Amino acid sequence: MSNAPRKVMVVAVREYQAAVRTKAFVITIVIMPVLMCGGLIAKKFTESHADVSDKKFAIVDYTNHLYEAIAAAADQRNQFAIYETQEDDTRRQTASRFVVQQVEPADREPAQVRLDLSDRVRNKELFGFLEIDAEALEADLTKPETTLVTYHSNNPVYDDFSDWVIGPIDKAIQAERFRKENLPEETVAWATQRIGRLKDRGLFSAGTSQGDRGDSDRAEARIIVGVVMVMLLFMVIAIGATPLINVVLEEKSQKITEVLLGSIRPFELMLGKLIGSVGVALTVVFVYLGGGYGVMIKLGYADYLPPTTLLIWFLAFQSMAILLFGSMFIAIGAACSDLKEAQSALLPIWLIICIPMFALQLVIREPSSPFVTALSLFPVATPMVMPLRLAIDPTLALWQPFLGLLLALLTTLLCVFAGGRIFRIGILAQGKAPKLSQLLRWAIKG
Amino acid sequence: MNGAVEIRDVTKTFDRHVAVNDLALTVPTGSVYGFIGPNGSGKTTSLRMIMGIIYPDPGSGSMQVLGKPVSRAANDRVGYMPEERGLYNKMKVRDILRFCAELKGHRDCRGDIDDWLGRLGLGDWSDKKVEALSKGMTQKVQFIASVIARPDILILDEPFTGLDPVNAEVVKDAILEVKRGGTTVILSTHDMNVAERMCDFIFMIFKGRKVLDGTLESIQDAYASDTIRVRVEGNGDVFGDLPGVERVNDFGHFQELRTTEQADPQAILHALAARARIRLFELARPSLNDIFVRIAGPEAQEAGHE
């Protein structure tokens, strides 16, 4: 091996060993998925700790015909819809019971009734109250400005009741109107039947015997695989590339850099660090993928494992991401004197890294829309968005990932080159961090 | 050009500050070459340029190391211990030495590592992390890192700073041993005694310019004719208005008289004998320290400003 590649590899091996042979790495490997899945865990936790105490609502029904139907629907809901059946067949309450009570206006003015009920809400006797106008049965409900049914509470965020109650009210108004028209109950029931929820059951493929079932399970599995890959990439950048800043800052503050530069060119030193980071990232990926594959096979879901080609694409894009963002991190580490400075400089880069995360839902919903296609070809977003698109849409034209890879590669080379120049100058510089204009000058002029 | 290092008319500018100005020197192969000069005079910049860590201004002269132009590729035949030194704290001593050796292309270095650690009294610390070492020990490890790949040129920037006398002696012996093995040693130091005792050639840089270059003898010869060392009986207050004496440096037990170029030592002797009983009168060579102070001391600085 000639000099330069050998030196690069010596640095890469040291960086790899320094990163992997630490307790912190092992702990991070374990904790990172927990942190990344924190949202799901938090959701589960909040669900299991949701407030399920009774919520009382007053109903002022000026039609005198709808309250009974609403109360019956509430009873029905309270008996069945707010429970979740556990594995041991016991039921667990997951939502509050809606306890409705009719309020008679008597001889009070509507305004006075509203004031009284509002006070009861403020005093926590009630959670909210519903007012149904006397004209509700006769008036045109389709008029957008209609205020025939109004809901009032002290908590505009809690919309469970208002979302739910409109169903029973609609149904009761319909029933009342049919009754007035003397339509038989059976006829009404038949005429107002609804299909209900329509579920995407996927596509059919020749040679498979799925009966009336399509491949919706596989489509869902592909989305899960795609999202897992994005999360994994995010973790890999956090574990593999981010520590580069600390390493460079340590070398700078501990005066190690000049010792190293007596033996190796700055660009080779930087390249060695990047390759070491790619090694760390691949280790992380293999640990997680290996674990994931093992679990999937053990649980009998081997059919849902992603195809090898997708994995190859993923590994290519994740290596590119490490080189791309790693070179930026190294340049920042070299240009700054301490971690505080570096963290400020790092913020814009993390925002760039997070762009695909913000667009995740959009990519999943419409993986081939013009915007998502353009986003996946935007080099700093490509490593995250393109594997997700490839996972979700197996029919994606191959020129797209290839073009994405090419653009990302060119951008990576540019970043590594510019980062190398900044690193060479910044690594021996002391004192105040350079301004952006100075960094650009270092990158362009060297 | 046949020295280990050849520098011709090299200039290095940082922004508007000229750190090294038209520098020219030749480091003879196999010698110990001392770099002296006050802080900020351009020593470290010169050494970094020899190492290829920083580059001279474009188009300013030439630099050759071991017969080849200094390129951007680090030279594996040159060992370097910078003034601002550091090691990875979390690495074991043996691992970091192997890392440094491998960076220089010296793979089979286990024996050399054991040998050097033993010689410098660090044999029991080979499997300890750097963070567990004292400052002196760390410095010795740093020295080993610079010589582990058996370099042809060894550049040491202030190698004795921070070492106690015992460890300084150990490192000094190690440097001379390396030299005896044929390695050219370039040594930057503030300690004039070290330079006098160890260096075959001395080079002094001041405000970026070369002001001294040669053997200690040749340098002292150049300044020899202007110093007279005397000791007289009495309180020594007899030197005022001596003909041809421009400055008296009182060391307590004796005095050094610096004379003008035209001064006649015989005339001074007669004048002094008329004033006091003389115990010692010798034409002396100035110490390197004295020469250093003459060139870079406050008086010289003031003269320079005038």
Image: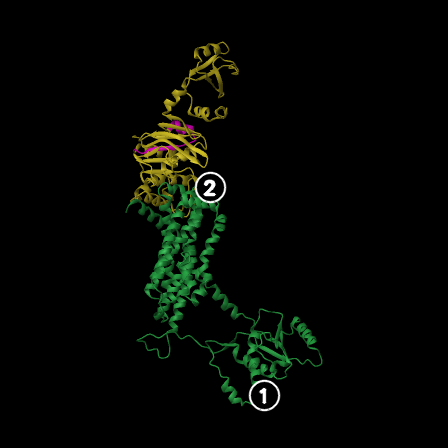
Q: Check the image and report above or below for A405 versus A425.
A: below
Q: Which chain is yellow?
A: B
Choose between A62 and A399: the one closer to the eye.
A399
The residue carrying mark 2 is A430
Q: Tell me the number on the disc at residue B101.
A: none
Image-quadrant location for residue A100: bottom right
| Residue type pointed to by label 1 | Lys
Residue plotted at (51% across, 77% down): A83
In the rendered view, tell whether residue A306 sits above or below residue B214.
below
Please tell me which residue lies in front, B297 or A154: A154
The residue range painted magenta reads B182-197
Residue A399's x, y, as percent? 34, 61
Three-letter amino acid code of the residue under disc 2: Gln
Of pointers 2 and 1, the one earlier in the residue sequence = 1
Residue at the spot x=57%, y=88% of the render? A179
Position in image of residue B277 (x %, y %): 48, 11
Front one among A139 and B41? A139
Q: Chain A colour?
A: green
In the displayed structure, would residue A333 be above or below residue B253?
Answer: below
The image's colouring method is by chain
Q: Within 10 angstroms of label 2, few (less than 14), some, or many (20 or more) residues?
A: some
